[in-house]
Amino acid sequence: MAVYTEVSDEDLTAFAKTFGLGEVLSCKGIAEGVENSNFQLVTETGGYILTLYEKRVDPADLPFFLGLIEHLAAKGVPCPEPVHARDGAVLKTLSGKPAAVVTFLSGMWPRRVHPHHTAELGRALAELHLAGADFGLKRANALSVRSWRGLLDSCQGRGDEVLPGITAELQAELDVLEARWPQDLPSGVIHGDLFPDNVFFRGEKLTGLIDFYFACNDVLAYDIAICLNAWCFEADGSFNATKARKLLRGYVKVRPLSNAELAALPLLARGAAMRFLLTRLFDWLNTPKGALVTPHDPMEYVHKLRFHRAVSGPAAYGLDA
Amino acid sequence: MAVYTEVSDEDLTAFAKTFGLGEVLSCKGIAEGVENSNFQLVTETGGYILTLYEKRVDPADLPFFLGLIEHLAAKGVPCPEPVHARDGAVLKTLSGKPAAVVTFLSGMWPRRVHPHHTAELGRALAELHLAGADFGLKRANALSVRSWRGLLDSCQGRGDEVLPGITAELQAELDVLEARWPQDLPSGVIHGDLFPDNVFFRGEKLTGLIDFYFACNDVLAYDIAICLNAWCFEADGSFNATKARKLLRGYVKVRPLSNAELAALPLLARGAAMRFLLTRLFDWLNTPKGALVTPHDPMEYVHKLRFHRAVSGPAAYGLDA
């Protein structure tokens, strides 16, 4: 739940004019997402999403994010497309914040994931990876394996307030991840946060990928590992191998995985679980009680991490190695 | 800022089918309003607002609210129109809550009020009063003069935490209001909460009146008094007589005011200030620190109440008595 910045109708009218959007018919704050202020904007010329970038996004990264979705959209990836202002810019200022307008994508994100969703997801993720290959800008992954030790240290042992012994368990896990993290797998642009609420469907058809604000350059198969974590566990914590198989099969139809990539999947999945576990743990320990945003429970990712640590090989994800 | 209830895509699809709305293209929670969960819904057949009624609304009142806007819309008042389900009902259940769908109104509410806004407001308010005259249902005003003493008592003297001496001042004010409150002015359906954020404009034209969840039967001129408070004070607390004059002139062009109604305006305006002062004071004293919703500052209405108490007659509002 968000909308941190109020936009006046007069400022908005002037802003819309800068972009040649026509008369503003309505503009309502969207109560989803926590990083930025998002508005559903309807003008004479169509539907848009207006985003005001709040302090959690580094303005220096905005050319990467906006350039990337423009690049991907031009290659047919169903992602929002930045609208250019009349002077050519995609980034302007509104209510004192960096602001951009992107095209509106129809579709709903799946509250309950079915296997047909993950098949489409795998296909779309592979298409995203292929389409990103010739994007000119680079952005390092601020939440890569190199950052995790520091993130755990910043929790100052307080992880044990959530689960006794977890700090030691994660330190041992980091020893393994740091030692064995693959160095030479194919890399490129990854989405980095492709959870169900960032993927829209109409019926069984995938119609949109949104929220590229964690996109960066990293190992491509790590993006698959993030999706295995985000899409293939049931609410009771069990792993749904059918959803994983459909995800991987959808992916390899578009971009085949090498044996090295397949062999690395369990370790990459441990890493992906670690990344979300650590950011959730940090937020959990540092969000004041009664705050606007309820932090996600880090325990969900403790269980996921343990699952991936116990698998014997990539066959656990439903694909023959 | 709201959206308290999450709606699954599957439940929503079934719900939209009940209403014959066609395929759901998108549904996003709106981060405005605090009483209910509101969603901007787009389907094949158009744009709608989906509302899930949360516990602050009494379900027994919903037939009045939904029936009223249907009645008003049929008479040309620009308010949302309830959509009937295929079985004829306007009220259904979604995610365990009473839920309704109304048509989407374009327009933006004015963050900065100009005199042309209040002229249109006055005209629309009078049209609303005339159109409501033959509405068949009745609803008592739960926040009428009769309720104010109890509301002040429920603050248990803690009003003095906001402003020393305010409790005694309000008790003396209530003595006057209760003794002099007019008994025989024309009454009918009033909106009861027509603040700027409930009125949409496109350019200078008023395009929508929304949020009828305080509508009830009461003195019609009291609705004008609410608008004098909500629309005619500047941010620095000063009263803008030009805005008031335009409001009243816009109103009387459609529904002339009797001498008795005009003479009662200062007292009704004191009452309206008291009503919002008391609910704000109660919320201010009873909202936990760091809560989701920041309560409005009751002091704004202390100043407004004192202004109205000091006026010598209706001429203060810019209209000749």
Image: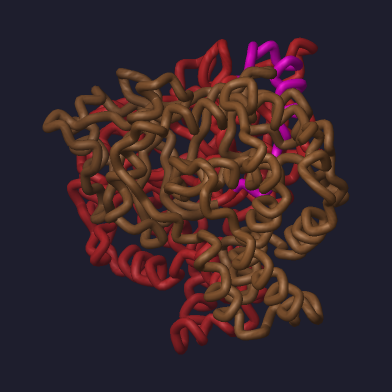
Chain colours: A brown, B red
Q: Is residue A129 visible?
A: yes
Nearer-the-camera pick, B15 or A137:
A137
Residue A108 lies in quadrant = top right
Which x, y percent locates residue A229? 71, 47
State which region is magenta.
Answer: B3-24
Q: In this view, does B6 lie to the left or right of B209?
A: right
Which x, y percent locates residue A267? 69, 54
- Taking the magenta stretch, the answer to whether it contains residue B270 is no
Which x, y percent locates residue A128? 49, 30
Extreme-bottom residue of the structure: B164
Q: In this view, does A224 lie above or below A163?
A: above
Q: Is residue B26 above or below residue A40?
A: above
Count numbered badges in the picture.
0
Residue B21 lies in quadrant = top right
Q: Is residue B5 visible?
A: no
Which x, y percent locates residue B153? 65, 76
Which quadrant would the C terminus of chain A be assigned to in this image?
top right
Q: Is residue B303 left or right of residue A110?
A: left
Residue A258 lies in quadrant = top right
